[in-house]
Amino acid sequence: MEFPIRINKYLASQNVASRREADELIEGGLVKLNGKKAKLGDMVNETDEVTFSNQKKCVYYALNKPTGIVTHSPQKGEQGILEAVKFPEKVFPLGRLDKDSRGLIILTNDGRMTDKLLNPDYEHEKKYVVQVNRPITKEFIKRMGDGVKLDDGYRTKKCIIKKESPDFFSITLTEGKKRQIRRMCSALSYRVVDLNRVRIMNVQLGSLGEGQYRPIRKDELKELLEDLGL
């Protein structure tokens, strides 16, 4: 870390909060720099002492998103995830699951998780079960596993893929390009009929019904946060 550093960036680097949340803590008078209330834009030197008091209780939920629900920024006539499902606290979804797909998505009010979970540099695993429109061949499995050149020229990373039945396969990715699995299948002349995300890192969808959610707690939460470096 290079000093001096802006105080909100410093707090984010210490996994205290996201930069936006750090600004809220500062504005609320909950951050001190060398014993005095910090101000937005303050710079921190290596020898400075930064203390904080964060009273917010962080919550974490696993949701089974149904098809037809939009994760972010619903347009006219669409239903957003936070409209379709009422949570007891104000939370936001981590990442996206397109309108035509279903399955596991994590929601939280912990802004620290956003980059830690979504940044592709960390290569966190996400597993999907996919049905396609025609029988799966050995060539399809090999080419999908080796990486596929998408319509924009990007070649996907190698991944874990397994044929589960004549027209179903499971796939574990460590990246998340927009509509990636659908585009990978399309490049090989297949069409996705159903796409269900069943795992994000150690968090499993399990028997959670569509539209239902559950809190992520105890050992499951501990492992998730530890693997994210939080």
Image: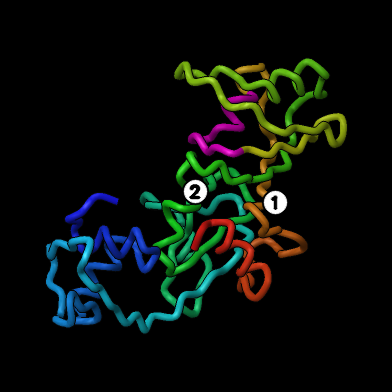
Packing grade of label 1 (10 A; few <14, some 14-19, many >=20) is many
Q: Nearer the viewer, residue 50 or 141?
A: 50
Residue 27: mark = none
Residue drawn at (19%, 81%) of the image = 29
State the SS at label 2: loop
Q: Is residue 168 above or below residue 45?
A: above
Q: Is residue 176 above or below residue 146?
A: below
Q: Nearer the viewer, residue 189 or 93?
A: 93
User: The residue under label 1 is which amino acid type?
Assistant: Val
Disc 1 and disc 2 in contact, CB within 8 angstroms: no
Q: Nearer the viewer, residue 41 or 104?
A: 41
State the SS at label 1: strand
Instruction: Where is residue 105? Give x, y as percent.
Output: 57, 56
**Residue 46 magenta-highlighted:** no
- Magenta stretch bounds: 174-185
Q: Is residue 29 above or below residue 100?
A: below
Residue 130 lies in what quarter of the image?
Answer: top right
Specify the farthest residue to the front. Answer: 47
Please give the residue where the numbered disc 1 appears in the rendered image. Answer: 198
Residue 111 lies in what quarter of the image?
Answer: bottom left
Please give the residue where the numbered disc 2 appears in the rendered image. Answer: 96
Packing grade of label 2 (10 A; few <14, some 14-19, many >=20) is some
Q: Say which label, 1 or 2, has the lower sequence index.
A: 2
Instruction: Where is residue 63? Give x, y as percent.
Output: 60, 63
Q: Is residue 187 left or right of residue 133?
A: left
